Amino acid sequence: MIMKNNDIHAAANHTFAVAKTDINREKNRNISTKSDISESKSFKKTNRNVKDVRCPAAGKCGGCDWLGRPYEKQLADKKKLVADLLKPYCRLEGIIPMETPYFYRNKVHAVFDRDRRGAVIAGTYEKNSHRVVAVEKCLIEDEKAGEIIRTIRDLCKSFQIRIYDEDSGYGLLRHVLVRAGHTSGQYLVVLVLSSPILPDKNNFIKALRKAHPEITSVVINVNDRRTSMILGEKEQVIYGKGYIEDTLCGKTFRISPKSFYQVNPVQTQKLYQKAIEYADFRGNERIVDAYCGIDTIGIVASDHVKEVIGVELNKDAVRDARVNARINCVRNISFYENDAGQLLTQMAQQKAKVDAVILDPPRSGSDEAFLSSVIQIAPAKVVYISCNPVTLARDLEYLTKRGYRAMRACAVDMFPQTAEHVEACVLLEKAGKAQPGRRGTVDRADGGMPART
């Protein structure tokens, strides 16, 4: 395990309710100082008064912990959390707010059930339980996706679709997943059923698309197990291509039912732009995108470097990444279905050169094996994108004790109205190492790369 110092232990126990004196002091300042990365002027023009917003499910579903808190206060509290965590390593430049911090989630899930009167309801599980809370309109989810779910709920009666009962294991419709293309306007509907057979499916699709012609694909996902998992393994496309496409940072990405794609594309674009700015590529670098998923950031970065190497363990994500590279005609990128730490270690053993590593790990952060491999390959720059500032601080401790310095950092409010969820981007540089872009990037003709798996 990576050792944590007292500062990180204290930060891990930090909550937004503590240190009220510091937060109140900050509340009286403008969120945007000269050093802040902020769009506060624009969001203040369009932001509604959150105090006037009411949600019938508030306090039950657990989704919008901070819905009743002014957005300026949310930003100040999140900024303070990240700044305190990163203080031993570098100064936080600011927090990037969302101009309109509502209806941003492009991936909307609803569980179906019946209420005490037998009426069909669609909503979410109550916090820390499996009781279903009916949600008529969610203030952080794509509005059209919510309308589609309500239409499906209403069609259940006329099409006599049986609602799945978790206790008995009987019934057909379990969940509905809707994925929205923020820029394309396309919508993918995933019907999670206990059986692959949807009675009268053609007329059902016809009725659904009559109400919502923006739906471009409908997929049946079969989950026949007594499990809390939402999606099953088997899928059947019953309308359209089985996926939608969307544009991010000028690149097109294919989104299927199980694809990982950031749920807030507006803020993701700002995050990626900041990561590219921090990296300050010169055009002839070789970079590794660790934990690449469908490789949104790697494909975006491909315009700015000589070569991108994407590494991901999930074979479905690697397949989608290759498709996305092909869609965007990106030819300077390759993908490896491998553990990122193992691949970097192999490259270091073969004396391969890597100029920069971009990583965007899960909330648990990176493990010591991966961070050790980064030290071995010794890139001039590391761009760390994090969805958990506590594990980010822990990993920064490891890297800064082994020859790296944190140079720049900013936070991005990726999930407005929710507590604690904030992204951060940090640039680290190898102490005393020459900047990439002023030297060759590969010593060997083959680049020192191991064979692909």
Image: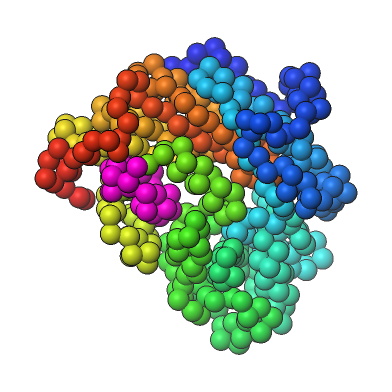
- Residue 260 picture location, percent across and down: 47, 54
Front residue of this view, candidates 120 and 2: 2
Q: Residue lying farthest top?
A: 6
Q: Give the tally of numbered discs.
A: 0
**Magenta-highlighted residues:** 282-307
Q: Which image quarter: residue 368? A: top left
Residue in the picture at 61% in, 76% down: 214
- Residue lying furthest front in this view? 438
**Is any part of residue 312 visible from this angle?**
no
**Residue 115 locus on image (x, y percent):** 77, 62
Q: Is residue 295 magenta?
A: yes
Q: Position of residue 36 (x, y in %)?
A: 64, 33
Q: Is residue 171 magenta?
A: no
Q: Residue at x 56, y 23 (%)?
A: 91
Q: Residue lying furthest right in this view?
A: 52
- Between 90 and 216, the one nearer to me in the picture: 90
Q: In screen coordinates, is 79 left or right of 194?
A: right
Residue at (56%, 83%) from the top-left corner?
Answer: 201
Q: Is residue 264 above or below residue 142?
A: above
